[in-house]
Image: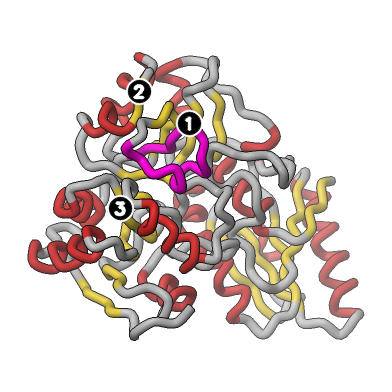
Amino acid sequence: MLIVKTKVIKVDPFNPEDNLIEEAADYIKKGEVVAFPTETVYGLGADATNPFAVKKIFIAKGRPLDNPIIVHISKYEDLEKVSYEIPEVVYKLVKKFWPGPLTVILKRKEIIADEVSAGLPTVALRMPSHPVALKLIDFSERPIAAPSANKSGRPSPTCAEHVLNDLNGTIPLVIDAGKTLFGVESTVIDFTKNPPLLLRPGALPVEEIAKEIGEIVVNEIAKGVKKFNEKEIVVSPGLKYRHYAPQKPLILVEGEEKKKIIKINELIELERGKNKKVGLLISEENLEFFKDKCDEIIILGSKKDFFKIAYNLFENLRKIDESDAEIFIVEGIEEKGLGLTIMNRLRKASSERIVL
């Protein structure tokens, strides 16, 4: 779907100019879509109360209609305008973690378009902390439905350039405020379940949430190990379809450190024996074992700094398709804190998973 040339407006990420945000808000009010920054990734936003506007998100992204979209609000009182039967623990959490990268699944009020939630009686809600996102929602005077601003299945965009790489010519406007803060999406928890269920690990580690409210169920789906059946309807994005994936093959190797290094070496030799150019995504700590063995190496970061690995993760996954290497191998990391989030994304992005 091609339209007029996509317009890009650059704004100050900390103090966005009112006139520029007003221009973007006018697009939202008129039922158009706008790509905008949040603290997690760039979102593709539309009026969450307008079914025709919401459908434009699905069309631009090539997104399946049964994949729900997170609704973004800018005021605490908006929580009760769009959802009901809100558990006390949710009030406790949003007081501590909003604005921020926490999404809560609650029962949906009719003001939110059915298309946002794939016709389900629930809604995924969060209040972003990025000044541009908050001002855009305020000026639009309505909740904004926004998944990541990329083609469906591709790595999420952490800068305006990524958005344009995927959506230039298919959306009318991109707000460019530089790179996002976290680089991975929000943490999603279903509070229609008791105990609450982690649906998607994200920028807010589940351990931090559990400190506030106690038990949170973390199952194999949240870890990215197991997938929903294609016929099942899901209440949150990031659960059902392959996500974050480069176009080239990506092999994920998980397990104990020594075994992992041996297996990666074996895979490199195997693929190079087929006259293939091999690339590697590797930690700083294990770089020394592979320096001269690959055609391209992308450094994930240090295993002592999961925040930095997460921050650069989607950018690094996009580098795979820019590389001359034909196949990539990536090492797994420990599933603690943001490590769970990183492994969820790598498992969904990989075309093959080897567990040692």
Callout 1 crowding tier (Cα within 10 Å): few <14, some 14–19, many ≥20: some
Distance in Å between CA atoms under marks 1 and 3: 18 Å
Q: Residue at x 31, y 28 (%)?
A: 94
Real-space Cα distance between discs 3 and 2? 20 Å
Label 2 Cα neighbours within 10 Å, binned few <14 / some 14-19 / many ≥20: few
Q: Earlier in the sequence, mark 3 or mark 2?
A: 3
- SS class, disc 1: loop
Compared with 258, 107 (above or below) is: above
Task: Pick whichever, 261 or 281, lies toward us.
Answer: 281
Instruction: Identify whether 125 is placed above or below 216.
Output: below
Write down the region rendered in magenta.
111-126
Magenta-drawn stretch contains 121 = yes
Please tell me the numbered disc located at residue 47: 3
| Residue at image point 19% right, 53% down | 140
Tag 3's secondary structure?
strand
Q: Amino acid at mark 2?
A: Tyr
Residue holding disc 2: 84
The alpha-carbon separation of the residues under discs 2 and 1 comes to 11 Å
Which dot marks residue 241? none
Give the image's coloring scheme: secondary structure
* Residue 274 locus on image (x, y percent): 90, 81
Image location of residue 349, percent across then percent down? 65, 58
Q: Position of residue 49 (x, y in %)?
A: 32, 46
